[in-house]
Amino acid sequence: MSIEIRHVTKHFGNFRALHEVSLDIASGELLALLGPSGCGKTTLLRIIAGLESADSGSILFSGADTTDVHVRERQVGFVFQHYALFRHMTVAENVAFGLRVKPRRERPSDEQIQAKVQELLGLVQLDWLADRYPSQLSGGQRQRIALARALAVEPKVLLLDEPFGALDAKVRKELRRWLRRLHDELHVTSIFVTHDQEEALEVADRVVVMNKGRIEQVGTPQQVWEQPASPFVYGFLGDVNLFKGRASGGQLQVGDWQIAAPEHADALDAEAMAFVRPSDLAVAPYAPGASGLAARLDRALVVGPLARLELTPREQPEQILEAHLPADEFRQLGVKEGDTVSVSPRKARVFLEVADDPAVMI
């Protein structure tokens, strides 16, 4: 089922949760709504589900306007962060619940329900836990049961609100890989809310980055990572080093240091900022007169194959830079904590600042 979101706006009192949000979601797509707390992603998910109503705008399922259709009639499955399983019911009873509460004329027979439950428990690889109670399961198992219960009613759309947020890092990683494989089998149109950048980039077909009730960027994980559309997107997707300066004639001047900005060749003494990811910051032993920015190596943390360096620029001592490089490469530099090194960007993205709205890119 495809979903069209058209000019949706939502207020809670004086707080504007969503402003003129429009988005197309393809049938069978796995889409991530990504952003910080309060950006509007859960509100948008609840409006799609029918759990909230928009102040204005419309929601269309496969071309049919469902704006005023009750949640029970939208054929939507919902998975919450905290499982919401019935503690007094077994795993099998939890999964069967949505089928057993259907109106009598739509309700499958007991044999059909039992077969469906076994099929779904096999799908989530937990058929051996059918007679257990939620309190006897791990967090990851409970969330998989919650997903099986949502799938039992054969939803046209599956909505997941921070589905792995209550789990530890190792279980989260395992479950998001499992969710991706499961989606590839079922091809149910799915939307999941997360504030975890790694989770969105690893699982989704497309990522919608939201900020302050608006959509900042929509694209594949590779597109939003490699071609961020705004300073907000660049800064939100992973660690980043920020350099502020002035741009003229295709160069950003940061103190006595220059960063190439050919995309802004027409700029004339404009306020600008350069974003450089830690993996794109080159580090070399310091030599007077050499190009690059002089910085003190404050900390070097070498764990496994990666060295994480914290550096303080000589010209901007209030700033801390972070560089990531292969551990072998760091050892070959022959530098230690307290030494002065030279840093320079292998790749940088420069944005011009716009008056009153530094999050707007030119």
Image (cartoon, rainbow, N blue to C red):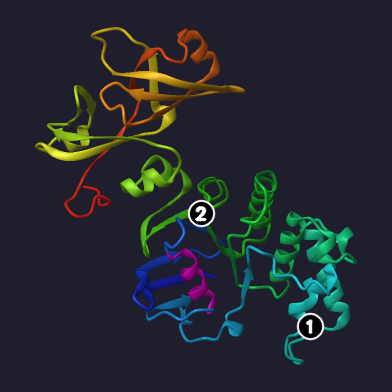
Labels 1 and 2 touching (C-beta < 8 A): no
Q: Which residue is mark 1?
A: 100
Decide whether residue 41 is among the magenta residues. Answer: yes
Quadrant including the N terminus: bottom right
Q: Amino acid at mark 2?
A: His
Q: Which residue is mark 2?
A: 195
Residue 199 x %, y % = 56, 49
Secondary structure found at label 1: helix
Main SS of the magenta segment?
A: helix
Q: CA distance from mark 1 to mark 2?
A: 34 Å
User: In this orientation, which residue lies closer to the viewer: 82 or 75?
Assistant: 82
The quadrant where residue 72 appears = bottom right
Disc 2 residue crowd, few under 14, some 14–19, many 20+, Cα 10 Å: many
Q: Residue at x 45, y 10 (%)?
A: 335
Give percent across and percent down for residue 243. Answer: 28, 33
Q: Is residue 180 above or below residue 117?
A: above
**Where residue 41 sits in the image (x, y, percent)?**
46, 64
Q: Amino acid at mark 1?
A: Arg
State which region is magenta.
Answer: 40-50
Residues 69 and 145: in front is 145
Mark 1 Cα shell of 10 Å, populated few (<14), some (14-19), many (≥20): some
